Image: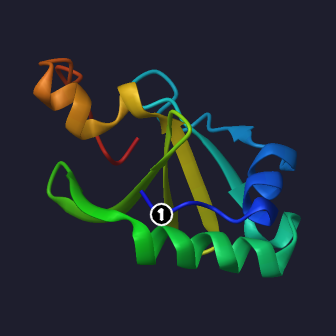
Amino acid sequence: MHPFSDRLKEFIAGSEWVFAKTYAETWPHEYIVQERVDNDLFIQLAAHIDTHGYESEFYSTRQIYFDFNGDTYWHMGNIINRCPESETYRRRKAEGRLPESWNREQ
């Protein structure tokens, strides 16, 4: 794992992560929105995820993920998401804990 700068660690710790109501029961996670946080640090964190992360799947979708301090981070446009590493798709798939039925269009 490539280390975060102290500024990015402070950004992660100091940001107000919002619990995502969408998919709350099947895929609980938190997020921050670029327009509501320090733009420069958001861009740096997104770039760090892309540069030092790993490609993995979420069902049939490929995504870049980055693990740090017990959480897994990924970004999608102007949003950075996180969830506990134990609740990622790849971990739950390996442990046979995927939701029995899940509609991505919820």
The percent coordinates of residue 101 (x first, y second) are 20, 25
- Is residue 93 toward the left or the right of residue 45 in the image? left
Q: Check the image and report above or below for 103 versus 66.
A: above
Residue at the image point whose x is 56% and y is 51% from the top: 81
Q: Quadrant of the N terminus?
A: bottom left
Query: Where, by quadrant of the figure, is residue 18 drawn?
Result: top right
Residue at the image point whose x is 43% and y is 78% from the top: 51
- For disc 1, the marked residue is 2
Of residue 43 and residue 31, the one placed in the foreground of this image is: 43
Residue at the image point whose x is 64% and y is 69% from the top: 45
Q: Coloring scheme of the render?
A: rainbow
Q: Quadrant of the C terminus?
A: top left
The percent coordinates of residue 8 (x first, y second) are 74, 62
Q: Check the image and report above or below for 101 versus 30.
A: above
Residue count near mark 1 (Cα–Cα under 10 Å), binned few <14, some 14–19, many ≥20: few
Going by the numbered disc 1, the residue's amino acid type is His
